[in-house]
Image (cartoon, grey):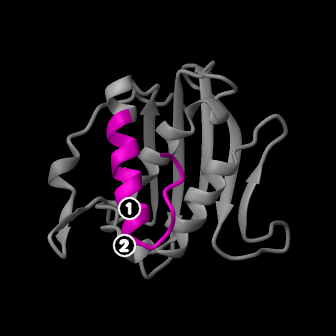
Amino acid sequence: MVAPPTIPRNHAQDDVKYLGHTMPTIERILECAVALNWKDLTNSGEATSIQVEYRTKTNRSLESLKFWSSTTRGAWHLVCDYRTDSTSTQERGLTFNVGHRSEDLAGMLDAIMQHQDAFAEAPSEFLDGLIQIGGPTEIELIAARKEMSEAMDRIGALPAHA
């Protein structure tokens, strides 16, 4: 299956207010985490696209995430996956494939996944979702740093990136 190209989205319509602050969707904060860890996820920026595949539980909370990178349209390489619960084959938390590692991403995902109620739900009615992200521009990195810092402050964690 060939993935469609990354389409920039206007996230303002997805965001909701929480105690006077904009509360990003869980999808948006995952996009920020990818942008801030782009080089770790793409082996120094060689990939042209990252996609985050997610599965939700019946209560709409995220159950698992898979991060895929692509250097060629339609060809995807599994970088890492995150599970909220242990299975017979994988422990809870983040598992990287060989050649990939990011302590910052691991910390961000742990905080995000443990405090999912700090974010608006994904807008989809389906249990599976997909987020596609292209290489971030400098402006997108600045916005992602700001949003991640605000999110980490809101959930009581230290910002992962200063």
Confirm whether residue 63 shows in the render: no
Residue at the (44%, 34%) spot, across then down? 133
In this view, the residue in front, 5 or 24, is: 24
- What's the mark number on residue 151? 1
Q: Which residues are magenta?
A: 142-162
x then y, percent, for residue 18: 21, 73
x then y, percent, for residue 107: 62, 59
Disc 1 from disc 2: Cα separation: 8 Å
Residue 153 forms part of the magenta stretch = yes
Mark 2, residue position: 118
Quick one: which residue is furthest to the front in this view?
Answer: 162
The amino acid type found where label 1 is placed reads Ala
In this view, the residue in front, 99 or 86, is: 99
- What's the mark number on residue 47? none
- Label 1 neighbour load within 10 Å: few <14, some 14-19, many 20+: many
x then y, percent, for residue 109: 57, 59
- When asked about the image quadrant of residue 154, the answer is bottom left
1 and 2 marks in contact (CB < 8 Å)? yes
- Label 2 neighbour load within 10 Å: few <14, some 14-19, many 20+: some
The amino acid type found where label 2 is placed reads Ala
- Residue 14 falls left or right of residue 144: left
Confirm whether residue 45 shows in the render: yes
In this view, the residue in front, 135 or 129, is: 135
Q: Earlier in the sequence, mark 1 or mark 2?
A: 2
Q: Is residue 125 above or below residue 52?
A: below
Residue at the (75%, 42%) spot, across then down? 101
